[in-house]
Amino acid sequence: MSSYKYYLVLLIVLFNTNNIFQYIHQLRVLPSAIKVAYPVAMGTEGDLWDGCDVAVFKLAESTIKNIETQGIKFFDSVVGNGYENYNGWKETPTLPIWKINRGEDNPTRCAVISATLLNKITEAVMQKGAYYTSNARMDLMAIPALGFAVIIDVY
């Protein structure tokens, strides 16, 4: 195999390995009560020291039903998972522009996801029926109407 093909294969392997690690990391930050079925979209911007990840997961049907029947009470015990702990949950609507931690602007700044998906999420959190929480560097949203859990991780 010529050397450029070797490096191309190596780059592809490294890229996919990074995606797998990102997926595992984002699953770890979800509280255990929030069950997800599969990733819808994931994106990252930045480098190892400064950046932002956005992950959108499809909520499991059982989680959607629990949220719809219990409302905000579902989140009373959903404060973390030992890996990440969150502040209390609140019901939307949020501010007209979703403010993430460190006073930065809404996820359009770092979202490497489709504009259509981002617009759906932004519209949903400006209406009643979704829920959100945060910690020092992360925001987490549960949007049962869309069936999404959204993580914005600023590092």
Image: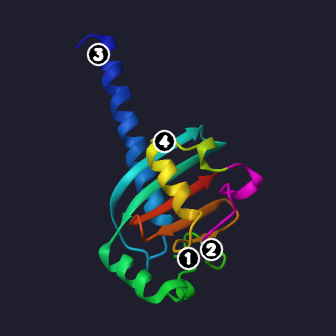
Kindly identify the amino acid type of the residue bearing the numbered disc 4: Ala
**Residue denoted by label 1:** 80
Whether residue 59 is situated above or below residue 71 in the rendered picture: above
Give the SS element for disc 2.
loop
Give the SS element for disc 1.
loop
As drawn, is 89 to the left or to the right of 41? right
Q: Is residue 121 visible?
A: yes
Asked whether the beta carbons under mark 2 and mark 3 sit within 8 Å of each other, the answer is no
Q: Nearer the viewer, mark 2 or mark 3?
A: 2
As drawn, is 136 to the left or to the right of 57? right
Asked whether the beta carbons under mark 2 and mark 4 sit within 8 Å of each other, the answer is no
Callout 1 environment at 10 Å: few (<14), some (14 to 19), or many (20+)?
some
Tell me the distance, in whole angstroms, between the alpha carbons under discs 2 and 4. Answer: 27 Å
Tell me the distance, in whole angstroms, between the alpha carbons under discs 1 and 4. Answer: 29 Å
Assign the N terminus to one quadrant of the image: top left
**Residue denoted by label 2:** 86
1 or 4: tag closer to the N-terminus: 1
Tell me the distance, in whole angstroms, between the alpha carbons under discs 2 and 3. Answer: 45 Å
Callout 2 environment at 10 Å: few (<14), some (14 to 19), or many (20+)?
many
Q: Residue 16: where, in percent of width, then height?
A: 35, 39
Asked whether the beta carbons under mark 1 and mark 2 sit within 8 Å of each other, the answer is yes
**Residue denoted by label 3:** 5
Kindly identify the amino acid type of the residue bearing the numbered disc 1: Gly
Callout 3 environment at 10 Å: few (<14), some (14 to 19), or many (20+)?
few
3 or 4: tag closer to the N-terminus: 3
Range of the magenta residues? 92-105
1 or 2: tag closer to the N-terminus: 1
Q: Which residue shows up at 60% across the image and 37% down it? A: 47
Q: Which residue shows up at 38% across the image and 66% down it? A: 147
Label disc, if present, on residue 115 of the rendered structure? 4
Kindly identify the amino acid type of the residue bearing the numbered disc 2: Tyr
2 or 4: tag closer to the N-terminus: 2
